[in-house]
Amino acid sequence: MNLINRINSYILYKYTRLVVRLFFYVKFLLLGRQLDSDGRDVTMRIRIRKFFQKHPHLNPLTNQLPFVRIFYGLDFYSKTSIPSLSFKEKELRSLPLKGDLEGCFCINSFGLQLYTRRSPQRSGKKKFLIKASPNFKRTRGVFLLIVITFVVSISCQKEKVEIKVNPNDFHAIVDKVTGIMVHDIFSPPVASRIYNYPNIAAYEIICQGKSEYQSLAGQLNDLTPVPKLDTTKAVNVKVAAIIAYMDVSKALVFSEDRIETYRDSLYTTWSGINEKSFTASKVYGLSVAKHIKAWLSTDNYAQTRTMPKFSVHTQDPARWQPTPPDYMDGIEPHWRAIRTLVIDSASQFRPASHPEFSLEKGSPFYKELMETYEVGRTIKEEGEDSEKLKIARFWDCNPYVSTHKGHLMFATKKITPGAHWIGICKIACKKTGADFYKTVYAYTKTSIAIADAFISCWDEKYRSNLIRPETVINQHIDENWAPVLQTPPFPEYTSGHSVVSGAASTVLTDIFGNNFAFNDDTELQYGLPIRSFVSFNQAAEEAAVSRLYGGIHYRAAIDLGLQQGKALGNYVVSQLQMAKE
């Protein structure tokens, strides 16, 4: 961004210098003075040469008198046969003066001047030895008028320049917030909330500037209309949308300074292009952000921070227990209390019950338990070439994976399941060449589905409180067995990845169409190769089954979780009226 600013400043400087030089040519033509091919004042040079021929004792070449040039603007006397120093007029008083004359020469637009010094004061007094054309005083006013007109025209032209914003600018700020979430280590449910509200803020602004899109006010629970856009102001809705996105995001993350640094860089660029438009856009964007922040403050998130932790009952063999290696408490046990967006309640898409916990051989639960166990053993036997292992790692999306080696413990931070699907949304937007408005629309609709999916899934997780495969297998089958992936710290049923993938894939299919083939490079930054899919649904199915390959879920949580997510996604599609037909 700084490089672009410097290039723009250099171009403006060169352009201004060229125009001013043309004005100097006009001025000298009005003065009746001749210029050579290098832009030097031939007439003045001839006068100076004749003067020194007549007064050789004053010639600085022979007497080494100091000779200076003063320029009001550009160095028009760039090359002369007379050696000189460059000083500002106010610095002449401090110059060391030589010779009987105790003076120094100055050449400028007014002619050749002699500056003398009267002792004991060191005040400069100038005397014209060679005067410019008498027409100069008359032409000086004309010239100054031309310069003022030029400056005003440049200023007005700058105000008329439009601030250009494209879809990549919005992708960039979404990526920036994703990186901050990875840094701050937000859990999957909380991360979905951070994506959701900034996108809605940006979307509500583009609705004001693009009639093809309809406001979500009255469609999302408790959302009222945002401040109306004043069309008499020079508001750039794209700029305002990004400003609102950044301001809402800043209120939701821990590392506010990271957003501020990025924001300030954009502000500097935009204000340098069109100060009036930027200011109007900023005022409007922040007003919408303020409205959205007031709305999100009532979604019960703050209240859930003070609710009690999840209680562990070890006497119940079916109840979830903390898992290795960190044995963390269950995260977000009260997420069901978060206000939903489109669905009427957290339990609206409650899935069918999982198989009843039983260790009897032949029971449905035991069969699913053994399937998870055997798949894990097979993958370890196949080693690094196992396709199932590659799938499990690709869709891991665990924001905090801890590694223990002796007394050493370190953590690997990655994106969440919701962030992975936000990344897929970006891929689809770029592949289709979606404009800024459709890009914001796609991100917003996808993030709404993801946010409601997490609320629905977490409602079931802490209702069923089902124990994880790793715990049961270690207790009753093989104490040395370990899953391919690290077991996340919350109950098993249903699979969060399955529910979220089902919802997100359904919404993306509605936006971009079925059989949308794409190359998923979302995990490339984490050292995982690109995987290709023929549709969003195929990607969702692979994401769901990856939890079986990873050894962290039973089959029912995967299959029924995917159904739960798709049902919720279809409901979001049917209820939201965003893009007008």
Image (cartoon, rainbow, N blue to C red):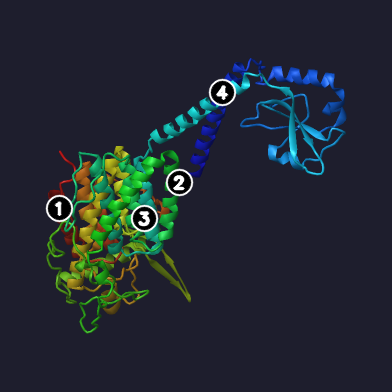
Of labels 4 and 3, earlier in sequence is 4
- The amino acid at mark 3 is Thr
Q: Which residue is mark 2?
A: 268
Of labels 2 and 1, earlier in sequence is 1
Res 57 → quadrant: top right
Res 579 → quadrant: top left
**Mark 2 burial class by Cα count in 10 Å: few <14, some 14-19, many 20+:** some
Q: Which residue is mark 1?
A: 218
Res 557 → quadrant: bottom left
| 83 relative position to 145: left or right | right
- Residue 62 position within the rendered picture, expressed as x and y whole percent measured from the top left: 87, 27
Q: Quadrant of the C terminus?
A: top left
- Residue 314 position within the rendered picture, expressed as x and y whole percent measured from the top left: 24, 83
Q: Which one is closest to the eye, mark 4 or mark 3?
A: 4
| 84 relative position to 482: left or right | right
- The amino acid at mark 2 is Thr
